[in-house]
Image (cartoon, helix red, strand yellow):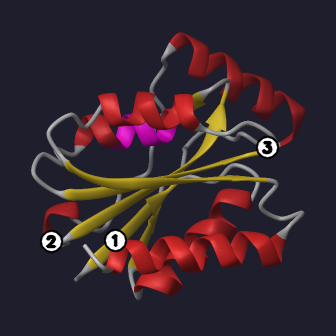
Amino acid sequence: MKSLVVYYSRSGSTKFVADRVAQGLEAETEELVDQKSRGGILGFLRSESESIRGSQAKLKDTTKDPNQFDLVVLGTPVWNGRPSSPIKTYLKAHDLSGKKVAIFTVSAESSGDDAVKRTRSLIPHCDYLGQLSISGALNNQGETEQKITEWCSQLKSH
């Protein structure tokens, strides 16, 4: 199954998980790059505020067409119980109807369930394969990698 991992990472935690998921699935990756700086505390506060307002991000152009892949895995940090604005922007620009889709969320503490629910609402006609919610990804790397390995095995069986 040809797979693509599409993700946005503000601090590096989601990138860490995305890289491991891509390894586990032997997938290609597409990192969403925001044209606006989100570094530091001001970037964090701006990101949280945008997630509450439902703002879209201005992204640099992507290079991979998700329609060329059998499975699209979406990875997002959790911002106030919501997916990141770059992921929302990507989903508004790409129709994943009928595609096999899986979602992973990365957060400091929360489960990510609300962010998954909100992400799924943006892709109602996909073939949803499941979710993985990671908290404290960089603090518990061994545990994180074990969860990712198990999840990738489940995704490969679909």
User: Which kind of residue does numbered mark 2 sit on?
Assistant: Gln
Please state, as top left, top right, bottom left or bottom right, where the C terminus lies in the image.
bottom left
Residue assigned mark 2: 68
Regarding mark 1 in the picture, which secondary structure is present there? strand
Residue highlighted by disc 3 = 39
Where are the magenta residues, as a range?
86-90
Q: Is any part of residue 84 visible from this angle?
A: no
Mark 1 nearby-residue class (10 Å; few <14, some 14–19, many ≥20)? many
Marks 3 and 2, how far apart at CA: 32 Å
Residues tagged 3 and 1 counted as in contact (Cβ below 8 A):
no
What amino acid type is highlighted by mark number 1? Leu
Q: What amino acid type is highlighted by mark number 3?
A: Gly
Disc 1 marks which residue? 4
Displayed quadrant of residue 120: top left
Mark closer to the observer (3, 1): 1
CA gap, disc 1 and disc 2:
9 Å
Q: Say left or right for 14 vs 130.
A: right
